[in-house]
Image: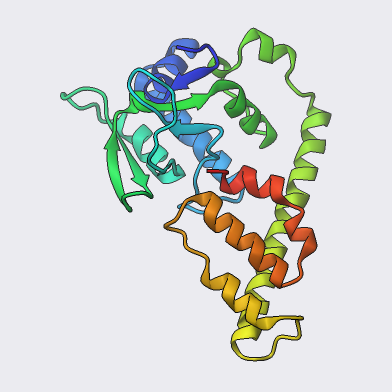
Amino acid sequence: MNDGLIRLSQLVPEHASYHGFDSQTAAHDLQELLEALRTNYFVSSGGSVPEHICWVGGATSSRRSSKHYMIDFESLSNYFETWAHPSPAGEPSFQCFCKTENEYRAIPAGSIYFSRNAMAEWILAAAVECPGFLISEESEQNTRTAAEIEDFKGKELASIRGLTRGLIEIIVELDRAHRGLSKKTDPAAILRAASELNLNKKTSTWRTALLDLAKAVELEEFRRSRQTLDKYIGRT
């Protein structure tokens, strides 16, 4: 196993070992951490963890599955909850939504991978205390100072607010186009672009359609936020 990766099945045992907790206490603590992240990142109950942080691989390889799985906060929370009631059958599996098949699938927790460094950075950027077992000696030396974290949070929050405002403007302008009230250059292009949005397709496909829609609505600033879109929506 690459030192930079950790399986979902290892999170509770490693957190318990690092702090001398029992498994139930460690699972509860990780569940609380997840809730803090969801709150600090303004994520709704169905929101997903960024794909560069967590993904579905295989039992012997961390190579990303060809199927499009979504690791959401709710499923992770439910997984940690199952540790409070150990099953005689052994380690709990993870219920993961597969967009390719449009249904939840039971995935072995050992096939879910996290990038330690990416996860630690994500937690620190939310100004939440990062579990020690995720931080290697090398990454500890590079840990951001409090001032750097605050600066990063400010920039990140500004980007999120810009995207949110842009999405609201798109919704408003799409409504105007439907009612024949749009004063944009090409209202018909707005309706065409909106018709291409399909959440059942790959993230990269509907993200491109969203950018085309922003272009039709004439939101250049939104279109320039591609890096932020990649981070919070995903690339694949």
Q: Hey, which quadrant is residue 130 in on the image?
A: top right
Toward the viewer: 133 or 172?
A: 172
Which residue sits at x=36%, y=46%?
97
Toward the viewer: 167 or 224?
A: 224
Q: Is residue 78 above or below residue 205?
A: above
Left or right: residue 203 versus residue 25 is right
Which residue sits at x=75%, y=40%?
153
The number of discs equals 0
Q: Is residue 8 above or below residue 78?
A: above
Q: Position of residue 41 (x, y in %)?
A: 62, 46
Which residue sits at x=49%, y=11%?
18
Q: Is residue 43 visible?
A: yes
Which residue sits at x=49%, y=45%?
48
Toward the viewer: 226 or 196?
A: 196
Residue farthest top in this picture: 137
Left or right: residue 52 versus residue 27 is right
